[in-house]
Image (cartoon, coloured by chain):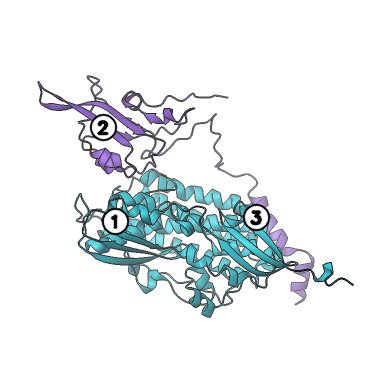
Amino acid sequence: MLGKLLKKIFLADLFQGLWVTFRNQNPKYIYTEQYPAERPKVAERYRGAPRLNINPDNGETLCISCNLCALACPEALIVVTSQRNETTKRKELTTFTYDTSRCMFCGLCEDACPVDALELTQDFEMATYTREGQIWDRQMLEEGPEPTQYKC
Amino acid sequence: MPDSTFLDSTELVLNMGPQHPSTHGVLRVILKLDGEKVLGTECIIGYLHRGVEKIAENRTYAQFNPYVDRMDYVAAVSNGLGYCLAVEKLLNVEAPPRAQAVRVILTELNRIASHLLWLGTHALDIGAITPVFYCFREREEALKIFEKYCGARLTTHAFRIGGLLYETYDGFEQDVRDFCDMFLPKVDEYEELLTNNRIWVGRLKNVGVLNAEECKEYGVTGPVLRAAGVKWDIRKAQPYSGYEKYEFEIPTAQNGDTYDRYIVRMQEMRQSVRIMRQAVAAIPEGPIMGKVGKVIKPAVGEAYVSIEAPKGELGYYIVSDGSTQPYRCRVRPPSFVNLQALDRMIRGGLIADVVAVIGTLDIVLGEVDR
């Protein structure tokens, strides 16, 4: 009883809490990211900006214009058009449009792709000045975004 | 003498929200006040309504999967699990044991992340600033595991119908074990900060009392129900995804006030660590995807599956008409049901307790409005 009273008078509970904050004065690891100066390292499986892969040897697209990604997309934001090549009797990709403003990066399109042409990459800086800039065409998808990098 | 003086003035109607930071989103509460005493409340919801149930009718089963993450966005993994289990029941398939174990680990990790966000913001509402920084620090570790596993931190889309898409990454088990070891002392640290603190106790004890009978009347589930002394947990009552294999207790309390709900949630975090430790010690080898075709086309029928989400009982009721799209998808969100008890909990209390009671219900408006 007396102990309880003394604890109350000398604010024991408050000092107990203050001791916790005092212990955390010098944290070993700081979680705050200094973003423009230090760029975060995202995980390997990060689902970021889309990319349409090209064959590094001859620069031709890997896409076989099967349209599976457009069908898998819940938001129907991928538009693939293709043309039939009369000599080789194969479909050839003409345009590929990807509306990143509506994309929720669920990754269903990259799951659907049978040839690993469409991929969600680790790029995460996709801001543009216009709404139209959010709609990526084939060239943009193959080159990927080139954000300005700031250094302190 | 005039009929009424300012001393016996009539009640005051005060609008709180939808931009009020303590309503945890876009909840609007109309308070009827007599001085500082709350005579009644009225909740106005729907500011975040996106028509998720209607969207489901226009998407295939696999396509709707990312949308469920956006209902309770602080516990996206639990939402995904509930939806996947419901479709799996409709298809009459079961996820392989390995997938089930990984699902349990990620769901429990998400429960901890959700409770941490609740603790931080709830303490912030009451006036304690420090816990929010500590909680977000540990939550970051949990989110890092999500990011490494499936590539997203918040709206994870971690599970697929029939099992998992992603195999666990190298060092997944070690990451989870490290998290468990790191996290338990941190819970003690939060308790040290808050449990005995006289301001915390004074603000929470006997505030927003909801006893067991009232909980049952309102259909309230989750930690709010358990704080009233009812030992009800879907993980024990109707085990799913292999929860019957793990040993854990259902933490309960007696009074059903805001302080008890705090104690129950702190204990739940410890139990989650216990489940994760057991699950990560015995992840079976084998396939991660069940026998599900490329096109998901369940037979005509209906299925209801409920799981224990961090906020309470989360149910999915799916009706199939034999096509690739659900005929109807109804979600029973815990936040929406728990919110109905708000008036009962606040009535007769003080206006300062309103934010404490909204905080203790742990609502997410994305789930309330859907």
Q: Which mark is residue B73?
A: none
For the point 54% across and 37% down, the residue is A33
Q: Residue furthest bottom?
A: B213
* Residue kind at label 2, given as amino acid type: Val
The kind of residue on which mark 3 rests is Val
Q: Secondary structure at mark 3?
A: helix
For disc 1, the chain is B
Which residue is more in the foreground, A67 or B51? B51
Q: Is residue B149 visible?
A: yes
* Residue where numbered disc 3 is placed: A20
Mark 1–mark 3 CB contact (< 8 Å): no
Q: CA distance from mark 2 to mark 1?
A: 34 Å
| Secondary structure under the numbered disc 1 in the rendered image | helix
Q: B194 left or right of B235?
A: right
| Whole-number angstrom distance, CA of label 3 to CA of label 2 | 58 Å
Specify the amino acid type for callout 1. Answer: Ala
Q: The chain shown in purple is which? A: A
Could you tell me which secondary element the residue under label 2 belongs to?
A: strand
Q: Is residue B174 left or right of residue B131?
A: left
Q: Quadrant of the N terminus of chain B?
A: bottom right
Q: Which residue is mark 1?
A: B99
User: In this view of the protein, which residue sits in the foreground, A52 or A38?
Assistant: A52
In the image, the chain rendered in cyan is: B
Circle 2 residue: A80
Residue B160, image x, y percentages? 30, 52
Q: Residues within 10 Å of mark 1 (few under 14, many from 20)?
A: many
